[in-house]
Amino acid sequence: MKKYRGIFPALVTPFDEKGRVDADRMQRLVEKNLRQDVAGFYVGGSTAESYLLSMDERKYALEAVMEAVQGTEASVIANVGVFATEHGLALADHARRAGVSAISSVPPFYFPFCMEEYIHYYNTLAERAQMPVILYNIPAMSGVTFKKEDIQRLFENENIIGMKHTSYDLFQLQQLIQEYPEKNIFIGHDEILLCAFSVGAEAAIGSTFNFMAEKFVRLLKLMNEGKQREALKLQDQANRVIQVLCEVGVFKGVKAALKFQGYDCGLCREPFLPLSKREERRLYETLLENDCL
Ligand code: MN9
């Protein structure tokens, strides 16, 4: 089973001035991140505003990424989660043909399904998509909390090769890493990356890597060299930025930060509203103070 290691930006979806998915901007963003030594990309997740995109737009954005990574070592993981299993399978089929390394999926949401239904969903995906599957545990957004027993049942399926853990529960994370050394447990909250790697995580998927990959790649290097205190300084810097992002709205904040860095990816799609001038200024100053510009 493939072991994923390193930093995987959960890519934003760049839009042009008219609000259309912009493949050129996507490719520039991917290339910038590749220069900063990321290990791969997570495409079509929450950060990508996937649930504000049409199915065709989701496919188009993924194709733009696949083109940009051609000839590199980068692994691409595509989130295919949507409401209905059949639609998820259609996205999975497209992702497989596009050449991704694995698919991932949020649990189907909005309707409160029962755990049996979620488990059936993931097993169906793993069987029918003919691709490795990575669970996406994000209780704050999906409304679904996977208990350890639920994850254990899902991990019995050997095509389910891991999980993106976007939760602050480090106890659960550590237990899973210990019990399933062969699975891939990605930390999905950038602000606790150092904590997660301290308890054995080896890979991270996050939205702030779009514009802070360099900082986090350096942080991992320091940790590997045993320089925990220096690594903590970088996490502290990043967390000051993330605090502001959480206040102004993470996804629109990430896009604003990219624009300040010269990578205009447009605005988030409505109903998201742009940052106010005040929020922009506060973000800009925080980025400057923390070595991000
Ligand atoms: O992909 C992201 N999760 C969400 C992972 O956006 C829900 C994280 O990178 C967070 O945005 C970040 C801020 O809480 O850790």
Image: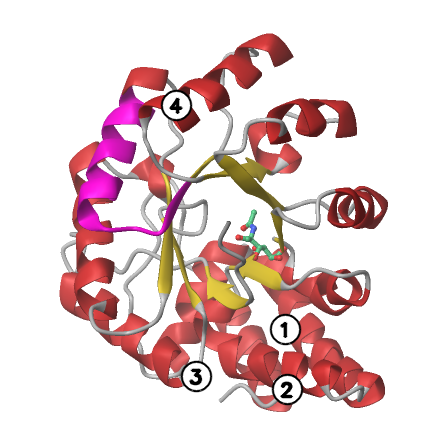
Residue 105's image quarter?
top left
* C-alpha span from label 1 to label 4: 41 Å
Specify which label sits upstream in the sequence, 3 or 4. 3
Amino acid bearing label 2? Asn
Mark 3 or 4: in front is 4
Is residue 51 visible in the rendered image? The answer is: yes
The residue indicated by pointer 1 is: 241
Q: Is 100 included in the stretch rendered in magenta?
A: yes
Amino acid bearing label 3? Gln
Amino acid bearing label 4? Glu
Q: Residue 36, which numbered label? A: 3
Kindly indicate whether the residue at mark 3 contacts the one at mark 1 (C-beta within 8 angstroms).
no
Looking at the rendered structure, the secondary structure element under dot 4 is: helix
Amino acid bearing label 1? Val
* C-alpha span from label 1 to label 3: 19 Å
Taking the image as shown, residue 162 lies to the left or right of residue 233, namely left
Specify which label sits upstream in the sequence, 1 or 3. 3
Residue positioned 31% across, 47% down in the render: 269
Residue positioned 20% across, 37% down in the render: 94
Q: Residues within 10 Å of mark 1 (few under 14, many from 20)?
A: many
Residue in front for this viewpoint, 276 or 258:
258
* C-alpha span from label 4 to label 2: 46 Å
The residue indicated by pointer 4 is: 127
Residue in front for this viewpoint, 241 or 139:
139
